[in-house]
Amino acid sequence: MIKFVKYKTKDGYEYYGLLNKDNNFIEIEGDIFTSYKITDKIINPSDVQILPPVMPSKIVAIGLNYKDHAKELNMKLPDEPIIFIKTPNTVIGHMDKIILPEMSKQVDYEAELAIIIKNNIKNIDEELVNANILGYTCLNDVTARDLQKKDGQWTRAK
């Protein structure tokens, strides 16, 4: 399994790398979405700032997709998926601080699996799905619960 990482050096340049068996990064050249070349430059993770793997144009999320969480929130499971959007400004890097909204008194976190799509796709056949996935990453879905309940929709709460 290939493990990509994006990072910024102290001089402000951003690079992609591959995580090696020693938990260092091997710098790569090129575009991870199409083709890249592995270099011989080894980067110590403590010498760089780890960035989000990509900066998406949007984040499409599915709400109440976990039965136990719906029960915890005392919410009925929907008949159809609840789709909501998170904007790119909600993406931060590893160890970056989460800025809590001053107007909220109840901010929760949720561990989620994020799928990084590498191509522009819509209404594709099921057998083409895997060919359009670049990879997976962890996502901390931070939610202002009181704003979510107040609005009835979820955009501002995310």
Image (spheres, rainbow, N blue to C red):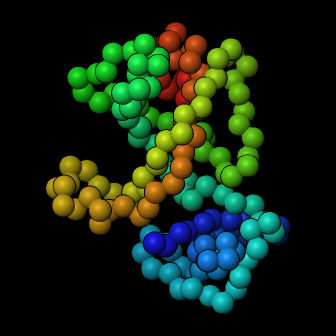
User: Is residue 17 at all visible to an observer of this figure?
Assistant: no
Q: Is residue 44 above or below residue 121?
A: below
Q: Quadrant of the C terminus?
A: top right
Residue 111, quarter of the rendered image: top right
Residue 42 picture location, percent across and down: 71, 82
Q: Give the camera-side residue of 153 and 136.
A: 136
Q: Residue 38 in the image: x percent, y percent?
A: 57, 85
Determine whether, in the image, residue 74 is placed left or right of residue 93.
left
Give me the residue at 66% from left, 90% from top: 40
Quick check: 141 left or right of 45?
left
Image location (x, y in percent) of residue 17 = 61, 74
Tell me if residue 109 can be seen.
Answer: yes
Question: In terms of depth relative to the viewer, which is nearer, 92 or 18?
Answer: 18
- Residue at 54% in and 79% down: 30
In the visual, does 78 lie left or right of 10?
left
* Residue 74, above or below 157: above
Q: Is residue 108 above or below residue 36?
A: above
Q: Residue 141: percent from the left, percent from the top? A: 55, 36
Residue at x 29%, y 21% (from the top left corner): 78
Q: Residue at x 41, y 40 (%)?
A: 60
Image check: 75 left or right of 80?
Answer: right
